[in-house]
Image: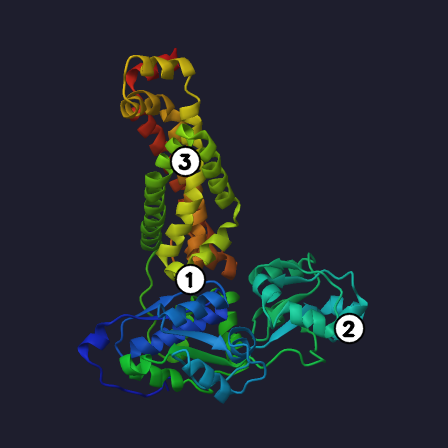
Amino acid sequence: MSAIAATAATQSPAEAQRPLVIGSKNFTEAVILGEIGAGLARHQGLAVEHRRQLGGTRILWRALENGQIDVYAEYTGTLAEELLRLPGADLDALRKALARRGLAMTQPIGFDNTYALGMRAQRAQALGIATISDLRAHPALKPGLSNEFMQRADGWPGLRDAYRLPQKPDGLDHDLAYRALANGAIDVTDLYSTDAEIPYYKLVVLDDDRHYFASYAAVYLYRADLAQRAPGWVSALEGMAGRIDAATMQRLNAQVKLEHAKEADVAAAWLGVAAPEARGRAARIWQRTREHLVLVGISLGLALLVALPLGVFAARRPRLGQGVLSLTGVLQTLPSLAVFVFMIPLFGIGAKPAIAALFLYSLLPIVRNTHAGLTGIPRELRETAAAIGLPPRTRLWRIELPLALRTILAGIKIAAVINVGTATLGALIGAGGYGQPILAGIRLDDIGLILEGAVPAALLALLVQGGFELVERALTPRGLRIAARA
């Protein structure tokens, strides 16, 4: 029998044609639950988009509040401890708090995916460690914890204080932590209790003897107005209550992580429906190329419109120019991922915040090289141009910019190449591009997927560099080319 709840609803043509969006966090279980939710919508003939692996909890939560997504899978412990800050709240209290934000929550799907700490069974047995409290007696142990767990209110800070743990962990990607644990690079990591890697790597889950971790029952969060826009989908999501137990979820995770099945196929098989048609590798690369070119092209174009005048201003007004150079230099020192996330409150998720972040990163090389090119022109040439009565604008366009062209184009080239690489981070906030297969490949330990994004990104960087070489040759006046060869 199909696992889809037998629900039907009559919808207006406008509602039926309006695309619906379900999001998922950047780990396998969330993507599978996203595919199941999308499959429920497709079963009713609804157009639905699954925006996969959109980074961490806060990104999905903000996107749901802002209406950029309609649904995503969450956990009650995360809601209570991290998002709503209502420790120990029951389901009714969570629903009331969500309703005040225009949001709603389904009944628990059926499994509890709580946080835990784990070690290799052999290592834990050798040290006599069975509980989290036992870690206190081993301060030299090397914990490696997922970056989100390191910062969450219900993660490491509270756990460390509750158990008075002396270790100082390093942060790393959750999926990479298992490999680090297996090869002995770290001794302890945080786990999700339904992770397929726990039995695969022969790990032992340490007993939470102080009962620090809350219940993390899986639910679907959705916008309250979805009940009017797509009532059948909401009914189907509600019909998921109690349908997936912990053993089933761990098995579904294992099919993806260990058997290398596609999330869409695993979800469709569980639902008992046909999987959506998969695109070939060439089609996927072409789509990601278009997305990447949009990110790089628009951000670089906007940067040229702003940075070139700023560079000229900095060269013409030395005192104020130092402030311009300092400001653009500070922007360049900001961590790229942080800048991407900072843009979400202003632009939401998707291409817009990625373009804004890439625009900021493009400013420094263009501004600095424009300034350097103009100030590097020999004084006697500038004085000669002024002596023969050329107006400032003419001197700039006819003499100074052509002489500084190579230096300016070098800055633009640097900005473009940096953008090609940095744009891969845009996948974490739903911008697509070559980062999408790279992130999926890291999550699934699939070298082929990583190369599907990394190789085209490298080729695009080379093409961009070669293209600007041709532009430089075309724009450089013939006299300057002859002088350079001489």
Q: Quadrant of the C terminus?
A: top left
Dot in front, 3 or 2: 3
* Label 2 secondary element: helix
In primary-sequence order, the first of circles 1 and 2 is 2
Q: Is residue 116 above or below residue 181?
A: below
Residue 58 circle label: none
Residue 202 appearing in the image = no
Q: CA distance from mark 3 to mark 2?
A: 55 Å
- Residue that mark 2 sits on: 134
Tell me which amino acid carries mark 3: Ile
Tell me which amino acid carries mark 1: Pro
Residue 345 circle label: 1
* Label 3 secondary element: helix
Which residue is at 49% across, 74% downward? 252
Residue 366 circle label: 3
Tell me which amino acid carries mark 2: Asp
Q: CA distance from mark 1 to mark 2?
A: 42 Å
Q: CA distance from mark 1 to mark 3?
A: 27 Å
Dot in front, 1 or 2: 1
Quadrant hosting residue 148: bottom right
x and y, in percent, of residue 16 in the image: 23, 76
